[in-house]
């Protein structure tokens, strides 16, 4: 009796075997009264396939696998009695040209710690979850309701957030360590979600997890699959969502990985003009092969359905959509219409996004897409890719370009801060200040800022306030919340000792206050994708480099007015136009001493301001306010 049935073969061949991870790989089972493990692998052009491992002393010929009917499918299977959980194994593939290929299991759920490369038999089906309250609430959210929820993401590289000092190994915090330390920190700060970099198994630390060999295995750097499930479970019990980085764009050429898996181009395009990334030295998946698409779809579904993950941030989407991405003339092949769009990748995205969001209401699919490709978050019916969100890289580049400028020159670049609202309705956006912006000599966020040390902190506080007030969901990379001074490196933990310095502690407190303001006020997240939720009070005060705008809630209650100055000039009599004859209560003030500001009891600003009938900014009513250098004032009305 075969584990992989004719129906399995049919579904796999159609790219619609959505539980493929329960069939492929290594699975404990009992056949005719005997307990053991059934091994299944796809190697369509292999001459022969053997499973080797601890159970047979790595004997290369004792356990030959058999092709499953129909033989054209190329699935090999073997049930081996007596194999236990924890047993290491690999597939030995004899290519048609006689080469011996020692391959890790593409569908393995657990792998040896690098630099070792064997797969490990495990069981990911019996974890005892206790997050039913979170999961049932997630399931009730419609797609429209998802967009009306707060989303403030803390992007984390688990191996360098914190480390155990003085240990002989890398000192990594385990998944269980992170459950005890990261979760309370994220809760206290006010983030809604954690985004974990580099969870799918990968061989090289310096790739940060973006060159994957194990699409079905949480990396063993931080513990077992059960330990990873424990971390997700604890996040959910603490009302924190979990997003994983996921990399269907390319894979590395490590010998034990997917490259020429059966001696031929199995997972990658055969033509190197389609199957190679010259800049990255990696292989590109063949999105025209149903079995390859099914491999990727099954991976995504496993993380969301088996591990209860709340969403996937899909890396390098642009590199998948464009056939000429990162390539010179002659290095790429046009599509059947002569264009540069990868039609197979487009179809893949429509399939996987519709499937995942349809099967898992409340989950999200996020595109890291760096071009102006239209309708990334549009519906399939409207020829969109059907992602939930797109990283707003345009906003990020404009924002950072502006923030790096000496304040004297900002007046000539005012539009860099206002431009993003002109296209805000075209996609569902996340504003991101990610790990990519604080590496490779780009400087930390703090050291991008102009001026002397005190000015750098005030600039960054104003920048974070602008980001938190602007339309769009939010993402900050770890360390940015307390103004990490050095660039990030995966080789060491964050510089937590900086928090002994009041300036860094004030920054952390400021970001915490912004995050709690964000979560407490629906006007900051309910209507992110429409002008109904945002209104400029003055978008054109370029001479003074001051921005004022209002964020509006659906019910019209508890709206917020933001006034943010990006120069070191104090404005004793700054007047801002306001939407009506309301009382404007000051709810966040960068001059507050708790954030390192200069307000004392004697000079403290009033807590509320009544609108006066003094025309300003084209409005009938206004309020006057003493705006400090690089001042931020947020009023509720």
Image (cartoon, grey):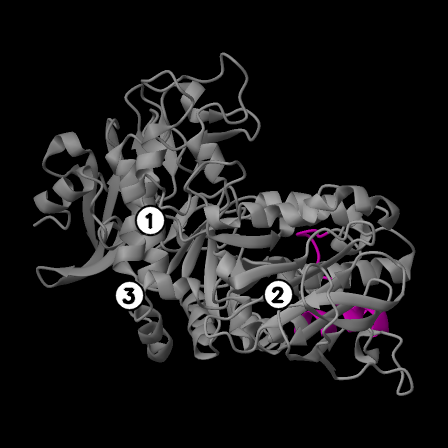
Q: Is 74 placed left or right of 389 in the picture?
A: left
Front position among marks 3 and 1: 1
Front position among marks 3 and 2: 2
Q: Is 488 placed left or right of 281 in the picture?
A: right
| Category of crowding for the residue at label 2, using alpha-carbon neighbours closer than 10 angstroms: few (below 14), some (14–19), many (at least 20) | many
| Pointer 3 or 2: first along the chain | 3
Helix or strand or loop: what does disc 2 sit on? strand
The residue furthest top is 330
Residue where numbered disc 1 is placed? 353
Residue where numbered disc 2 is placed? 550
Residue where numbered disc 3 is placed? 125
Q: Residue at x 58, y 73 (%)?
A: 559
Q: Between residue 239 and residue 269, name the one nearer to us.
A: 239
Residue 288 place in picture, x, y as percent: 29, 30
Q: Residue at x 70, y 44 (%)?
A: 415
The residue furthest bottom is 601
| Category of crowding for the residue at label 1, using alpha-carbon neighbours closer than 10 angstroms: few (below 14), some (14–19), many (at least 20) | many
Q: CA distance from mark 3 to mark 2?
A: 49 Å
The C terminus is located in which quarter?
bottom right
Provide the residue span drawn in magenta: 488-513
């Amino acid at each position: 009796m075969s584990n992989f049935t004719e129906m399995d073969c049919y579904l796999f061949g159609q790219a619609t075997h959505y539980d493929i991870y329960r069939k492929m790989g290594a699975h404990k089972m009992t056949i005719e009264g005997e307990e053991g493990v059934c091994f299944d692998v796809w190697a369509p052009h292999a001459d022969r396939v053997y499973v080797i491992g601890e159970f047979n002393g790595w004997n290369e010929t004792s356990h030959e696998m058999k092709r499953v009917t129909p033989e054209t499918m190329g699935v090999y299977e073997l049930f081996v009695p007596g194999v236990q959980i924890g047993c290491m194994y690999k597939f030995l593939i004899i290519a048609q040209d006689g080469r011996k290929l020692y391959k890790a299991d593409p569908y393995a759920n657990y792998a040896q710690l690098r630099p070792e490369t064997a797969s490990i038999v495990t069981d990911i089906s019996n974890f005892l979850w206790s997050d039913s309250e979170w999961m049932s609430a997630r399931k009730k959210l419609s797609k429209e309701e998802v967009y009306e929820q707060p989303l403030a993401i803390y992007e984390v590289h688990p191996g360098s957030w914190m480390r155990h000092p003085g240990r002989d190994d890398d000192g990594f915090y385990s998944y269980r360590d992170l459950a005890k330390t990261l979760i309370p920190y994220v809760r206290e700060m006010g983030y809604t979600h954690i985004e974990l970099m580099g969870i799918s198994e990968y061989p090289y630390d310096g790739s940060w997890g973006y060159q994957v060999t194990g699409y079905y295995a949480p990396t063993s750097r931080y513990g077992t699959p059960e330990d990873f499930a424990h971390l997700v479970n604890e996040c959910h019990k603490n009302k924190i969502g979990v997003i994983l980085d996921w990399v269907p764009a390319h894979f590395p050429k490590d010998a034990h990985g997917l490259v020429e898996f059966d001696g031929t181009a199995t997972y990658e395009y055969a033509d190197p003009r389609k199957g190679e990334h010259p800049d990255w030295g990696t292989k590109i998946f063949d999105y025209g092969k149903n079995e390859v698409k099914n491999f990727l779809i099954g991976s995504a579904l496993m993380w969301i359905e088996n591990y209860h993950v709340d969403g996937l941030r899909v890396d390098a989407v642009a590199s998948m959509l464009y056939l000429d991405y990162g390539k010179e003339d002659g290095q790429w092949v046009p599509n059947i219409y002569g264009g540069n769009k990868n039609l197979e990748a487009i179809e893949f995205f429509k399939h996987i996004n519709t499937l995942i969001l349809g099967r898992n209401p409340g989950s999200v699919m996020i595109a890291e897409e760096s071009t102006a490709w239209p309708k990334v978050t549009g519906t399939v019916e409207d020829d969109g890719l059907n992602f939930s969100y797109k990283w707003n890289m345009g906003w990020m580049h404009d924002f950072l370009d502006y923030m790096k400028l000496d304040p004297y020159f900002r007046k000539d670049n005012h539009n860099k801060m206002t431009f993003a609202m002109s296209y805000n309705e075209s996609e569902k956006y996340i504003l991101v200040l990610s790990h990519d912006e604080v590496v490779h000599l780009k400087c930390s966020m703090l050291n991008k800022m102009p001026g002397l040390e005190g000015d750098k902190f005030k600039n960054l506080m104003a920048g974070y306030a602008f980001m938190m007030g602007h339309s769009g969901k939010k993402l900050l990379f770890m360390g940015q919340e307390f103004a990490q001074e050095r660039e990030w490196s995966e080789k060491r933990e964050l510089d937590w000792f900086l928090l002994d310095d009041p300036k860094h502690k004030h920054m952390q407190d400021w970001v915490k206050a912004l995050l709690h303001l964000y979560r407490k006020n629906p006007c900051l997240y309910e209507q992110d994708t429409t002008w109904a939720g945002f209104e400029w009070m003055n978008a054109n005060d370029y001479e003074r480099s001051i921005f004022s705008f209002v964020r509006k809630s659906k019910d019209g209650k508890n709206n917020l007015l933001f006034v943010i100055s990006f120069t070191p000039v104090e404005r004793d009599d700054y007047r801002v136009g306001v939407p009506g004859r309301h009382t404007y209560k000051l709810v966040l003030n960068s001059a507050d001493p708790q954030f390192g500001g200069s307000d004392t009891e004697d000079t403290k600003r009033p807590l509320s301001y009544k609108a006066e009938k003094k025309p300003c900014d084209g409005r009938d009513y206004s309020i006057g306010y003493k705006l400090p250098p690089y001042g931020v004032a947020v009023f509720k009305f």
